[in-house]
Image (cartoon, rainbow, N blue to C red):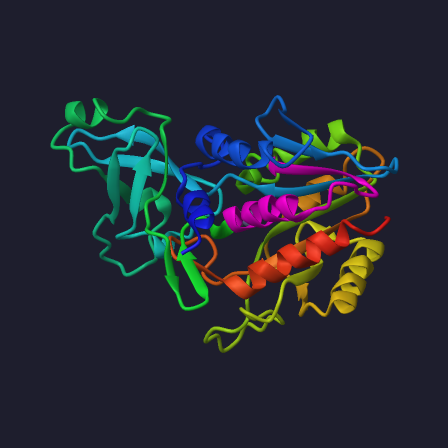
Amino acid sequence: MNELIKKLAGAFGPAGSEEGIRSLIREEVEKVCDEVFVDDLGSLVAVKWGNAKKNILVAAHMDEIGFMVTFIDKNGFLRFTNIGGVLKNTLVGSRVVFSNGVTGVIGREKIEDGKEPGLNRLYIDIGARSREEASARVKIGDSSAFLAPVSLEGHRVISKALDDRIGCYVLIETLKSLPASLPCTLHFVFTVQEELGLRGARPVAYRLQPHFGLAVDVTRTGDTPEPDYKMNVSLGKGPAVKIKDSSIICHPQVVEMLVRTAEKEGIPYQMEVLERGGTDAGAIHLSREGVPTGGLSIPCRYIHTAGEMVDLDDVQNSIRLLAALFAENW
Ligand code: CO
Ligand code: ZN
């Protein structure tokens, strides 16, 4: 098992509570870049200075989806609201953990009418016997995230938060593999609060004024049993070059550079049109007067569940592709 993937995916960091995951990433990138800083909303920026004036922003978000406590009832059960796009049908029985280490399991009210319950019918059970006991361990406004092991099955990793810690891993490993002298200056940005609507990427893109932008995130696949929904991305067939998602139509120049680099290096790749979901690319390309921006996506099954799955070949090929891409003169 890759220890760094395990550490990154296992770390706690729901949107708005990225302190822990940020210091972990900081430790990794500090050794291999020229400058590191944190912006006012908490995004971490690792800089590699290049020879030309061109400046490229590469983003991966370090936050994950989660659950925030809204109310503690007299029996010690916690009501919660979503932090980002949690899928209510997949939650019951999932374990969660708070930043102080308190754990719980998600339960659901008994539903008589057979209708799909909303999040307001779910609760977190931390094993407390009363409101007092629960309140001593968890407060209103505390955030939790999935608690799930990181496991390796053959070539594939299963874990919570591979969205987008696997993107963070790809950025870190790309940084490590870059040559000392680069044509363009690179800003590797580990953003906050992507899961709440690309919030961290916006101000950091404004500040850095990049000439080009690229978001590295996971994307859905169409290779699991699904009778109606077809998507042209499979696990293990290479990183996906994004053409469109709900937040962006990628700039043709960036799409073309990704494709050309993959072809030149003989790296397998796929073309991605994601019908639902956005990425930091959406926020970056609308910064200032507009920034030509694209996306490189790691195919991932079961996104936004406690058991997301990626293929390690896709991960390695993403790193190879990015390293080759940043050796180019943009
Ligand atoms: Co996500
Ligand atoms: Zn994501």
Q: Nearer the viewer, residue 56 or 225?
A: 56
Residue drawn where x is 48% and y is 74% of the image: 226
User: Where is residue 22 shown, x and y percent of the image?
Assistant: 51, 32
Q: Is residue 304 left or right of residue 47?
A: left
Q: Is residue 188 magenta?
A: yes
Q: In the rendered image of this protein, does residue 316 appear above or below residue 109?
A: below
Residue drawn where x is 67% and y is 55% of the image: 296
Q: Is residue 122 magenta?
A: no
Q: Which residues are magenta?
A: 164-190
- Which of the 4 image quadrants contains residue 141? top left
Instruction: Give the quadrant of the N terminus.
Output: bottom left
User: Where is residue 203 shown, x and y percent of the image?
Assistant: 69, 29
Q: Nearer the viewer, residue 34 or 43?
A: 34
Q: Nearer the viewer, residue 121 or 157?
A: 157
Residue drawn where x is 44% and y is 37% of the image: 14
Q: In the rendered image of this protein, does residue 238 appear above or below residue 23?
A: below
Residue drawn where x is 42% and y is 52% of the image: 87
Disc tally is 0
Residue lying furthest left: 129
Q: In the rendered image of this protein, does residue 254 appear above or below residue 28?
A: below
- Which of the 4 image quadrants contains residue 243? bottom right
- Which of the 4 image quadrants contains residue 135? top left
